[in-house]
Image (cartoon, grey):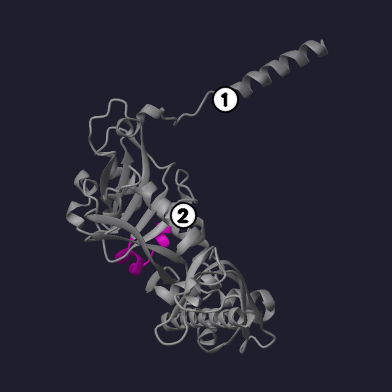
Amino acid sequence: MNRRFLRVAVTMLFCITLLGLTGCWDSVELNRRAVVTGVAIDRGPSEEEKYELSFQVVVADEISGKNARGTSPVAVYTGRGRSMFEALADASRQTARFLSLGHVRVLVISEKFGREGIKDIMDVLERESETRLTSFMFISKGQTAKDSMTTMTVFSKIPANDLVEKLETTSRQFGYNFKMEVDDVVRGLQIPGGGPLINGVLVSGDEKKSDTNDNLKSIAPKATLKVTGIAAFKADKLVGWLEGSEAVGTALIKNKITQMPLLVKRGQGNYVAFNVYLSQVKVEAEADNPEDPLITIKITQQAGLKESPNNLDLTNPKVLNDLSKLVEQETEKQLTAALTAARRMNSDFLGFGEAVKRDNKKGWKLVENHWEQIFKKCRVKYEIDAVIRHTDMRSSSFQAN
């Protein structure tokens, strides 16, 4: 009798368990989804239309080639509302399919919104289950964010993918721009006394012709989508742009440089070009007295000589040593430029406060409420060691003969 009762009980429990496996109540079939690859967030003209969201949607038939009609490979739909969710609902009225945000690769925020504050935007992006924390973030410099979503590009049919590829190329080889994802920006908002860093994006050229196929029919495109400087924030508000040495120095301190070109001046009108292919950086603090900390930036660099338009004897160790010293001096100038910019903007986006907190947690609690004042005058020391590892395909130029 006990066995029979046990069998019945197990059977009933198994049936009850199956009831929870009936499927997803909110599932949407793939052929009912519109895949969104990029989202642009602009500031609307009023509080009733505070958010203007533009969604770059893939036209699958044009991408695959099957049943292609020769139209644009993407379409952009714009919705407006008092909140981001309301703007999304407004945009959905324009498309026959559900806007699917699970494949968003690029999020662009207008500079106007950036200066007003992005904390509410970031809260939505982190909270929404469909969005990806690995999407790359950009600030549209001096233009609407929508412009970045409506520019036809040469190397990729989908503009959002083209922007991602450009960022990956410049971050790996030639520039100070580095990958900044949604999660990185959220963490940057929590830097004490500082804020996040976000790449800039810009449409250069004739913006009126950027959204048509005519932009691709000439050797020189009428409009080009490009990665530009770095937007620096204080808390959640954009406070300035980093370009040139300021941006390079910032990327160095954040230990984000993979490779970069470096030009040093030697004599009157003579320059020597290097490829710095390895930079290892540590930011340390001596904060026994947290009111007067010493920040030490230690950098080890390896470089290869790429251009030497003069008759330098590159087989001479002393010449290479002198060039190494010039590389170190130029690197120090870049670091100083970054520090000067951060102090001018009154934002510790360099992370010096975090270094003080790591060194002296108890002391940090005494200064965190007025760290801004300490950051403006704290002592900073550079320890730079640069080594020229090679001179590329030849040791001496034919000009030395």
Pick the front one: 216 or 131 = 216
Q: In the structure shown, which secondary structural element does the residue marked by tag 1 occupy?
A: loop
Q: Look at 34% across and 69% down and name the residue there.
A: 115
Categorize mark 2 by other alpha carbons within 10 Å: few (<14), some (14-19), many (20+).
some
Tell me if residue 123 can be seen.
no
Q: Position of residue 22 (x, y in %)?
A: 53, 23
Disc ID at residue 253: none
Q: Is residue 26 above or below residue 400?
A: above
Pick the front one: 73 or 371 = 73
Quarter of the figure with residue 42: bottom left
What whole-number distance in Å separates the C-alpha atoms at marks 2 and 1? Answer: 42 Å
Q: Position of residue 398 (x, y in %)?
A: 49, 71
Furthest toward the right, the residue is 2
Determine which residue is flagged by label 1: 21
Specify the segment rendered in magenta. Answer: 110-123
Seen in the image, is 386 located left or right of residue 197? Answer: right
What is the chief secondary structure element of the magenta stretch? helix
Pick the front one: 211 or 52 = 211
Q: Is residue 79 above or below residue 316?
A: above
Seen in the image, is 74 located left or right of residue 28? Answer: left
Quarter of the figure with residue 15: top right
